[in-house]
Amino acid sequence: ALYFLPNIADPFTAYPELAINHVPFPIGAALLMGVLGASMSTANGGLLAISSVMSRNIIQRDILRRMLKRPGLDDRKLLLTTRIFTIPMMVAAFVLGYLIPQPGVYLILAFDIVFAGAWAPLTLGLFWRKANTPAALASLIVGSALRLLMFFITPVEYAGIETMIPPVISFVLFIVVALMTQKKYPGRHGIVD
């Protein structure tokens, strides 16, 4: 991009600028459609995944069964609950997209948030005997929230650092919380050797 656009004012517009003004139309259209397709696929998958997790794991398992001691939702109500949860997720995505209109960046951000929050629980959950639920929850919440926060506060000249710091903090937090909560929440699963 620097070869074709040495004096570009906003580096986030380099990709569309190249696709629209510096390559033949069919190639530029294919480049833009590729980003659009990947963004839509990621958005659909993300909406369905978070809605399913919220309805099945939070509402059905944690709230209804554990807290209220009631039976879970039947398949029809579970599907309806999943569909309802897509609405607030879509509103949140719309607000974020309206405030900062950078769709290519959101594709990277979506994967970074998952990486920052889920790296430690997935890795340590498989290979460390002391891994437990409080550590996984703390790591997921703090890692993901920190990555999202750093998206807004990291200056452009430090781009890239916001991808590296949250997973490391999440990893350390996982270990600290797991060790602090071992007596009340011991690890329940075997280890993969």
Image (spheres, rainbow, N blue to C red):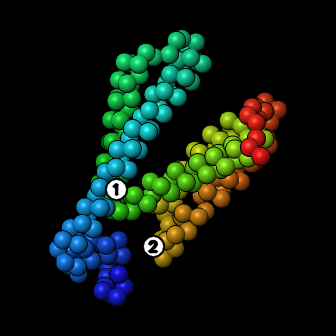
Using residue 27 as the reference point, say whether residue 145 is left or right of it.
Answer: right
Q: In this view, does 183 lie above or below 99?
A: above
Q: Residue 65: where, in percent of width, then height?
A: 56, 17
Q: Residue 108: where, in percent of width, then height?
A: 43, 60
Residue highlighted by disc 2: 156
Using residue 127 as the reference point, say whether residue 147 is left or right of it.
Answer: left
Pick the quarter of the image with the N terminus.
bottom left
Q: How many marks?
A: 2
Q: Is residue 178 visible?
A: no
Q: For residue 28, which quarter of the picture?
A: bottom left
> CA separation, marks 1 and 2?
24 Å
- Taking depth in this image into account, of 182 and 72 the one nearest to the observer is 72
Residue reaching furthest top?
A: 70
Residue reaching furthest left?
A: 25
**Amino acid type of the residue tagged 1 in the rendering:** Ala
Within 10 Å of the Cα at label 2, are there few (<14), some (14-19), or many (20+) other Cα atoms?
few
Which residue is painted at 39% across and 38% down in the image?
48
Residue highlighted by disc 1: 38
